[in-house]
Amino acid sequence: MPRGLWKGAISFGLVNVPVELFAAEKRSSELDLTMLDKRDLAPVGYKRYNKATGEDVPWGEIVKGYEYEDGKFVVLSDEDFRRANVEASRTVEILSFVNLAEIQPQHFETPYYLVPGKRGEKAYALLRDTLKKAGKAGIATVVIRTRQYLAALISQDEVLLLNTLRYADELRDVEDLDLPDALNKQKVTPKELELALRLVEDLADEWKPEKYKDSYRDDLLARIHEKVKKGQTEQITEAEKEPRAGKSANVIDLMALLKKSVEKKAEERPRRRARKRRAA
């Protein structure tokens, strides 16, 4: 059982649902790579040191501080963060309910699970089923560690999922992007749209996240094993030169590409059906 981050309650109206907050993300599958000095391949470390004495400082001796005047600090402990607002630090305060489909993808940040506490199962199930039936998300504030987040409370299968949200002012406006002027002048023909829609339909499938794996991690491990096998353990691979693009490289025959894609999918369809029949 993973360790809960805190025990508290979901609050909406006069209803309080006791819950415990758990991280929904597992440990990253990213390879653990060591930073090396290119000159002698010695490991490069990150040093925590006292800027006054130059001595190393162990993690156990590090505290957080707020500089209220130049060179003067107020030391803050975990208890100080809790006492700043005891209720807020242990409460998912629902402010409103919105249509889940209206929350734009770029606002979602980090997922957490909320598990019902003792004697809170009935109210928890009621809120979960109500959100699912209404297609709504509860927009709430929640304090996680030392920061208050905006969050969406979502019904997900048998549990309530709390997904922190990015505030509007944390997101870059599309108008800030240097989009090419030619983008607004592009006109998609009905035939191009028809072929593109056919290709989308050919690739349509049910959302099954377990089907998708981090293939790049496996490819990188294979590359590492290849270098070990060849004895290239201390050899730095030089970057390949990019081939120069010809004048016609910028001209894309979109219709031809779409037609080839649709034809290829049409050829693959009987093989997919045969595999499904064998699997059944």
Image: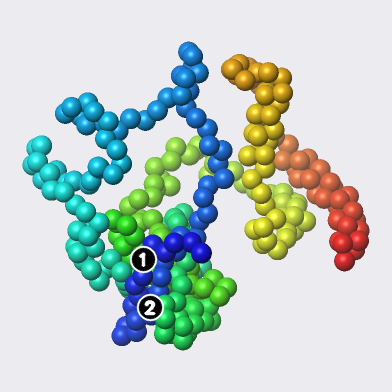
Q: Is residue 225 visible?
A: yes
- Seen in the picture, residue 124 relative to 221 is either above or below; the reply is below
Mark 2 is on which residue type? Pro
State the image quarter where residue 218 is shown: top right
Q: Is residue 117 left or right of residue 259?
A: left
Q: Is residue 99 visible?
A: no
Mark 1 is on which residue type? Trp
How many numbered marks have been drawn onto this rendered protein structure?
Answer: 2
Q: Nearer the viewer, residue 43 or 141?
A: 43
Judging by the rendered image, the residue that carries numbered circle 1 is 6
* Image x and y of residue 67, in percent: 14, 43
- Dot 1 surroundings within 10 Å: few (below 14), some, or many (20 or more)? some
Q: Nearer the viewer, residue 250 or 277?
A: 277
Q: Nearer the viewer, residue 5 or 154?
A: 5
Q: Nearer the viewer, residue 169 or 61?
A: 61
Q: Is residue 245 left or right of residue 48?
A: right
| Residue with the most extreme top position | 39
* Image x and y of residue 264, in percent: 84, 46
Please give the name of the residue rendered at 53% of the width and 37% of the height, measured from the top-left corner: 32
The Cα–Cα distance between marks 2 and 1, rounded to whole angstroms, is 11 Å
Please give the name of the residue rendered at 13% of the width and 48% of the height, measured from the top-left corner: 74
Q: Residue 258 got which mark?
A: none
- Seen in the picture, residue 183 relative to 161 is either above or below; the reply is above
Q: Earlier in the sequence, mark 2 or mark 1?
A: 1
Q: Is residue 70 left or right of residue 104?
A: left
* Image x and y of residue 87, in percent: 25, 71
Please give the name of the residue rendered at 61% of the width and 16% of the height, measured from the top-left corner: 235
Q: Is residue 26 left or right of residue 217?
A: left
Judging by the rendered image, the residue that carries numbered circle 2 is 18
- Asked which secondary structure carries label 2, the reply is strand
* Image x and y of residue 214, in percent: 64, 45
